[in-house]
Image (cartoon, rainbow, N blue to C red):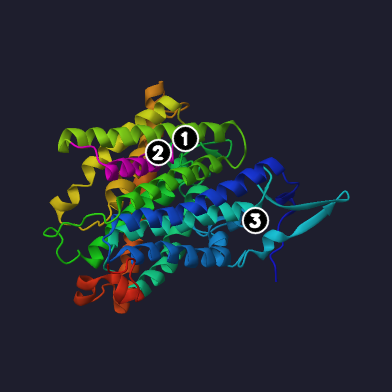
Amino acid sequence: MQTALPDTMFGTIDAGNTAWVIMSAALVLLMTPALAFFYGGLSRGKSVLNMMMMSFAALGTVTVVYVLWGFSMSFGNTLTGTGDIGGVFSNPFALFGSDQLMQTKEVGGATQVVVWGSTHIPAIVFLAFQLTFAVIAVALISGAVAERVKFSTWIAFTVLFTTIVYFPLAHMVWGGGLMSNAKDSLASWMFGVADGVAKVAPIDFAGGTVVHINAGIAGLVLALVVGNRRGFGRTAYRPHNIPLVMLGAALLWFGWFGFNAGSALAADGIAGLAWVNTAAGTAAAMIGWLVVEWIRDRHPTSVGAASGVVAGLVAITPACGSVTPVGALFIGLVAGGLSALAISLKYRFGIDDSLDVVGVHLVSGLWGTVAIGLVAKDSGLFYGHDYKQLVVQTVIALFALAFTGVLTYVIALALKPLGWRIDREAEFTGIDGAQHAESAYEPA
């Protein structure tokens, strides 16, 4: 039986906005295969297929669970007009299967559909767009545990993580929950309410907390629970195919314009600003990373350029709709330098974050989220405003860290009976053959 949606959820479609968001969703979907290329190239030749399969597995499992209960958990309360559970998630059964989004009404001889917000895109299109975010958020985590995790356990993790961590976090940030501008959110508790919303609203335009801090801290927790690769600290783990890394980074950058500019949910000036800021911040981050390499190592590298691109994309994601292009350049430049410095810390602390998920996504995600409090054009400290936006951004970043960190640890422990690690021989001979009975490259 379908949940009857309120009359206020029906409306006419804006064709231009709808076309833009559908195209953006396709661009974001491309990012997960692009990530597979990026991670695959960074891996060793005997592990490349498994690394790519981890991304493709997320594309399969997360798509299914998002359609079934993920959208309902993330945004169901907004469409049904019902409350959520403690500001953390919505009823997973309210819109189970998402068939309800295809309801129609006849008004004045015209057919109206279920729409999402004032931009008048169909709710089913908004689902498509948000689905792609959930997919890549999970796929990103895989880089922290490359070359040593059982494929079956990884598949189980993708389902549990999206259900227990990602969907609630998406609801809290974008669905009117604890990390939004709702009247009972964290921000409202800190600085009060005006006109029914928090006086100082948290800003996360396209997923700094939901995607990147989330994936980064989850990757750190998994790396700690799973343990290091045998030989970590003694073996040189070199990328086996740098052109593949560059191709992946290029496609990620291309798809990211849908990720950020599409989050405006309209073909308007905000989308244009997000597009320009995405280009500017990413370019600056690549330069920042290469400068650090040039000074530290005396050689700017191709892998460094590709990694700088990703660091910039991560950092500008939460801020792209609220800063000027100059602010985007500042955020990107700092992000590139910070992440270039941060990736070496895994050796100091003895944590095998294999493909630098923590050094890039966690570090740049934290910086981009907090930096909004400094350079947001309407509320940032550097633009003559007070400290409140900076405090709110810091609180939501820390809350996301704690929420994801604790729950990921619980999930990781719960999956231990399945076994996280492949055996010693399989790790030595190569995970591709052991887990998939395939080899990326035939012997000469």
Split into 4 quadrants, where in the image is the N terminus?
bottom right
Residue contact between numbered discs 2 and 3, judged by CB atoms under 8 Å = no
Identify which residue, 333 or 189, lies in the foreground. Answer: 333
- Horizontally, residue 231 falls left or right of residue 68, namely left
Q: Are marks 3 and 1 in contact (CB under 8 Å)?
A: no
CB-based contact (under 8 Å), mark 2 and mark 1: yes
Q: Nearer the viewer, mark 2 or mark 3?
A: 3
Q: Position of residue 97 (x, y in %)?
A: 61, 67
Which secondary structure type mostly characterizes the magenta part of the structure? helix
Name which of mark 2 and mark 3 comes first in the sequence.
3
Indicate which disc residue 200 carries. 1
Judging by the rendered image, the residue that carries numbered circle 3 is 124
Residue under label 2:
392
Q: Tell whether 104 sits left or right of 364.
A: right
Q: Please check the rendered image and state whether residue 101 is part of the magenta-colored stretch, yes or no.
A: no
319 drawn magenta: yes
In the image, is residue 230 above or below residue 117?
A: below
Q: Taking 345 as reference, is 80 above or below it?
A: below
Counting residues from the N terminus, which is met first, the one under dot 2 or under dot 1?
1
* Mark 3, secondary structure of its residue: helix
Residue at horizontal 71 percent and vertical 43 percent from the top: 15
Tell me the distance, in whole angstroms, between the alpha carbons under discs 2 and 3.
Answer: 32 Å
Residue 388, which numbered label?
A: none
Q: Which residues are magenta?
A: 299-320
Q: What amino acid type is highlighted by mark number 1? A: Val
Foreground tag (3 vs 1): 3
